[in-house]
Amino acid sequence: MAPTQALFREDAYLKTADAQVVALNDRGGLILNRTIFYATSGGQPGDTGFLECADGSRIVIAGTITGETKDEIIHLPAPDQPMPKPGEVVKLAIDWERRFKLMRMHTACHLLTVVCPFPITGAAVNEEDSRVDFDLPDAGVTKEDVTASLQELIAADHPVFTRWITDDELAAKPTLVKSKNVRPPAGTGRIRLVCIGESASVDSQPCGGTHVARTGEIGEIHVGKIEKKGRENRRFRLRFGPLPVA
Ligand SMILES: [Zn+2]
């Protein structure tokens, strides 16, 4: 089966699109020829939304996941939805309000790795609260300092863009990879780099997620907590809004 064309990879701002139903898998998942629904991966949750059939009936999509490979994108209908037939053309609509929050949060997590340039041991992006774990025996920083540095990068309204590089280019620049345990998939020939700043002056790292186009779109955000998670791990939590007054 041809892989689903992942439209969100080139344009994260697509809210609607048309697509054709390719197949229904044995667990009721829908596979389309192309999609704007991001599938859960790399710490970013998959999109929700709906598909609209030609007759106007709607299929609520409760989640989106990858299949056996990352190229396989499976749309998961909510219970008791009408099912389209393979070949049918449907209109896609993602829950944009939710996705935009995830894009703002996800981009903020990249900025956090600029402010805190330590090996990453884990990350999870959510609508209201995200976390990045660092291999860091002693934080040595306060949430006030980190919040101020983040807000500076946001206020500078740096451009965010993607660029594809080859496996060899990545191998020549191992510092691009900030994850301690997770390596970007090698062997596909090309790797997607997410860059921040003119000529990537602020940051670049391999990532397949969706991000805002300029850091200013992140808006107000703060470090809610820096927690100790084991002897050598520190968990930084990001939340929208200003730093609460203690
Ligand atoms: Zn990312």
Image (cartoon, grey):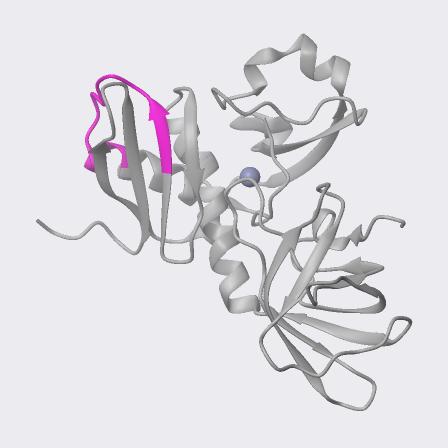
Total marks shown come to: 0
The vertical placement of 202 against 216, above or below, is: above
The vertical placement of 42 against 206, above or below, is: below
Between residue 97 and residue 219, name the one nearer to us.
97
Q: Where is residue 150 in the image (x, y as percent from the top left)?
A: 35, 38
Can you name the residue that lies furthest to the left here?
246
Quadrant of res 186 = top right
Residue drawn where x is 77% and y is 75% of the image: 91
Q: Where is residue 75 in the image (x, y as percent from the top left)?
A: 68, 63
Residue 139 part of the magenta segment: yes
Between residue 24 and residue 237, name the one nearer to us.
24
Residue drawn where x is 29% and y is 46% of the image: 222
Ligand 1 visible in quadrant: top right
Quadrant of res 207 = top right
101 left or right of 183 in image: left
Stretch of the chain drawn in magenta = 132-146
Quadrant of res 235 = top left
Residue drawn where x is 58% and y is 50% of the image: 40
51 left or right of 220 in image: right
